[in-house]
C-alpha cells in the first residue's frame, strides 16, 4: 500500500504552485475540499461553497471537540478549517501541511485572530514533530490520499493521539482494484497519488493499528456532485481542468474513485473499553468497531472459553442435530466450537450486525439474527431450542441478568442452558443470583477454567424444569 512512484516533494511543489489557481474558481478563501449536499439533484454552482461548509459542520457535530480539546489538523492548507474550529469551539488547534506557501498563508490569516489558540508549521504526516499522546483529536480533510506512505502516517496519527482520543477524517478511496487508463491519467496521475484503500480496507487498517472505527460514511454521491459543479466552475477559465473533472465524475460513477468519512477512537485496552460501556447502543457501536480484528486479537487468549463452553454443552446434549441457540454469538467463535464437535443446527443472535457479518462467513449457523437480549425476543416461537448457550454475554457493561428471562421462553422444557461467566461476576452480582433463583432451572454442572492467563471463568450448565 505504501509503494508509490510519487514523492512528498512532488505533492509539495504541486500545492505550492497551484494555490492561486484553485482560489480563482474553487474557493477564494483557499479551502480545498468537497461538499455535502442536502439535495443531490441540485445543479447550481452557487450551492457548492455552502455544501463545503455544511461538511465542516457535519464533521464537527460528530467530533466531540470542546473548548478543552487540543486538535491536530493534518493537511491544514491555508488554515481555514483550523481557524473555524477554534472560533466555533474555543479549542486549541495545531495545523501542519507540506506546502510552505499554504502554511505562510495560514500564519498570516491567524494573526487576524490573536485571541484564538492557533499554531501552524510545515511538517509531514509521516514524521509528526510531537510527543506521544499530545492531542485529544486529529482532524483531516481531503489530505491523506496525498500521503504516499499512508500507513506510516496513520501510525503516526495514532501515536500522537492520547488514549481515548478521536481521529476523524475524510479521504478519497479506491473501491476497486481495477483502474482504467482514463482514471489513471485524469485522477491518480493528475493528482499525484496511487490507488488507496477501499472503504472496508480503511476500516481494517485503522482497526489493526488501534483505532476503533465507531462511524464511517460512504460519500461517493456527494463527491460526484462536487466534481459535477466544479466542472462548471472551472470551465470559463480552465477548460482542460474542467474536462479532467468530467473524467473524475466518470471514475466515480464506474467505482474507480470514491470518498469516505471515518471516525475512530484510540483504544489500547479493548476489554476495559468494552466493560465500561453504559448502554446497549454504545455497546453495539463498540462491537461493530471491534469486529474487524476481534478474532485475531483474541485467538490465543480467549478461544478456550467457547471451546470449554461447547464441551460442557456436548456432555448433556449428545444429539448432533439438536436445535441450539448461540445467544450473543459475536463473530461465531462458539458456533465454530460447536461445529467442530459435529453440531449442525445452530442459530445465532447478537446485538452487533458487524460481528454477525464475520460470523456469517464462517458458515456454521443455519440462521443469524440481529437482536437485543434485553428486550422480549420475537425472531422465533417459544420452546424452539433444545439448548441455549451464552458465553461472555452476561458480564460487566453487557447484557443485564434480566436478559436470561427473555431467553428462557425460547428453551424447551427439559432443555439445557449453558451460561459462561466471569467468576467474580457470578459470585458478586446479586441481580444475577436473584434471576437464577427465580427461573425454573436446575444446576447440573459448574466447571472452572481461565482466560487471558489470569481471569477465572465458570461454564455452568442448567436444565429447565
Image (cartoon, rainbow, N blue to C red):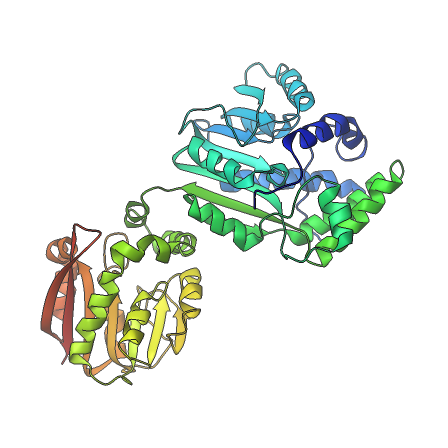
Looking at the image, residue 453 sits to the left or right of residue 208; the answer is: left
Which residue is painted at 40% across and 57% down in the image? Answer: 291
What is the x, y in percent for residue 81?
Answer: 61, 30
- Tally the marks: 0
Does residue 249 show up?
no
Indicate the position of residue 387 as horizontal and vertical percent values: 24, 78
Residue under the image location 77 percent in, 32 percent down: 22
Q: Position of residue 169 (x, y in %)?
A: 55, 40
Quarter residue 19 falls in: top right
324 versus 454 height, above or below: below
Can I make out residue 438 in this image?
yes
Task: Say above or below: 149 vs 363.
Answer: above
Query: In the rendered image, which quarter is residue 240 located in?
Result: top right
Give above or below for 379 relative to 165.
below
**In the visual, does 193 lie left or right of 316?**
right
Judging depth in this view, the residue of 98 and 435 nearest the camera is 98
Q: Nearer the viewer, residue 220 or 396?
A: 220
Question: Residue drawn at (67%, 41%), measured in percent from left and top?
Answer: 193
Question: Residue at the location (70% across, 39% down)?
Answer: 192
- Residue 311 at what x, y percent from top left? 20, 72
Quadrant in the picture for the C terminus: bottom left
Amino acid at each position: 500500500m505504501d509503494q508509490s512512484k510519487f514523492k512528498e516533494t512532488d505533492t509539495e511543489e504541486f500545492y505550492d504552485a497551484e494555490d492561486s489557481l484553485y482560489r480563482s474558481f474553487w474557493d477564494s478563501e483557499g479551502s480545498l475540499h468537497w461538499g455535502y449536499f442536502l439535495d443531490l439533484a441540485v445543479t447550481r454552482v452557487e450551492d457548492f461553497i455552502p455544501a463545503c461548509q455544511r461538511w465542516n459542520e457535519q464533521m464537527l457535530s460528530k467530533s466531540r471537540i470542546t473548548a478543552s480539546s487540543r486538535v491536530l489538523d493534518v493537511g491544514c492548507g491555508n488554515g481555514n478549517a483550523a481557524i473555524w474550529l477554534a472560533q466555533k469551539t474555543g479549542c486549541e488547534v495545531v495545523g501542519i501541511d507540506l506546502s510552505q506557501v499554504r502554511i505562510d498563508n495560514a500564519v498570516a490569516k491567524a494573526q487576524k485572530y490573536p485571541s484564538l489558540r492557533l499554531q501552524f508549521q510545515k511538517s509531514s504526516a509521516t514524521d509528526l514533530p510531537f510527543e506521544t499522546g499530545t492531542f485529544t483529536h486529529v482532524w483531516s480533510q481531503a489530505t491523506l490520499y496525498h500521503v504516499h506512505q499512508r500507513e506510516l502516517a496513520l501510525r503516526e496519527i495514532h501515536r500522537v493521539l492520547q488514549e481515548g482520543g478521536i481521529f476523524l477524517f475524510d479521504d478519497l478511496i479506491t473501491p476497486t482494484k481495477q483502474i482504467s487508463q482514463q482514471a489513471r491519467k485524469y485522477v491518480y496521475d493528475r493528482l499525484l497519488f496511487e490507488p488507496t484503500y477501499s472503504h472496508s480496507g480503511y476500516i481494517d487498517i485503522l482497526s489493526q493499528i488501534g483505532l476503533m472505527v465507531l462511524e464511517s460514511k460512504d460519500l461517493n454521491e456527494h463527491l460526484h456532485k462536487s466534481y459535477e459543479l466544479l466542472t462548471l466552475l472551472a470551465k470559463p477559465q480552465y477548460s482542460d481542468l474542467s474536462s479532467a473533472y468530467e473524467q473524475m465524475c466518470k471514475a466515480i460513477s464506474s467505482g474507480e474513485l470514491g470518498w469516505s468519512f471515518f471516525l475512530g477512537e484510540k483504544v489500547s485496552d479493548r476489554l476495559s473499553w468494552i466493560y465500561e460501556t453504559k448502554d446497549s447502543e454504545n455497546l453495539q457501536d463498540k462491537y461493530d468497531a471491534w469486529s474487524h480484528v476481534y478474532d485475531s486479537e483474541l485467538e490465543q487468549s480467549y478461544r478456550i472459553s467457547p471451546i470449554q463452553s461447547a464441551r460442557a454443552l456436548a456432555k448433556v446434549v449428545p444429539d448432533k442435530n439438536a436445535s441450539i441457540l448461540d445467544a450473543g454469538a459475536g463473530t461465531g467463535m462458539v458456533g465454530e466450537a460447536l461445529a467442530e464437535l459435529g453440531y449442525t443446527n445452530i442459530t445465532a443472535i447478537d446485538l452487533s450486525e458487524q460481528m454477525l457479518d464475520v460470523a456469517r462467513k464462517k458458515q456454521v449457523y443455519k440462521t443469524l439474527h440481529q437482536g437485543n437480549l434485553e428486550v422480549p425476543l420475537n425472531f422465533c416461537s417459544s420452546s424452539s431450542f433444545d439448548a441455549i448457550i451464552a458465553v461472555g454475554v452476561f458480564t460487566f457493561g453487557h447484557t443485564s441478568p434480566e436478559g436470561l428471562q427473555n431467553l428462557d421462553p425460547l428453551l424447551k422444557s427439559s432443555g439445557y442452558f449453558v451460561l459462561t461467566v466471569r467468576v467474580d461476576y457470578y459470585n458478586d452480582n446479586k441481580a444475577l443470583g436473584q434471576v437464577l433463583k427465580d427461573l425454573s432451572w436446575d444446576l447440573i454442572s459448574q466447571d472452572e477454567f481461565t482466560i487471558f492467563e489470569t481471569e477465572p471463568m465458570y461454564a455452568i450448565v442448567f436444565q429447565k424444569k
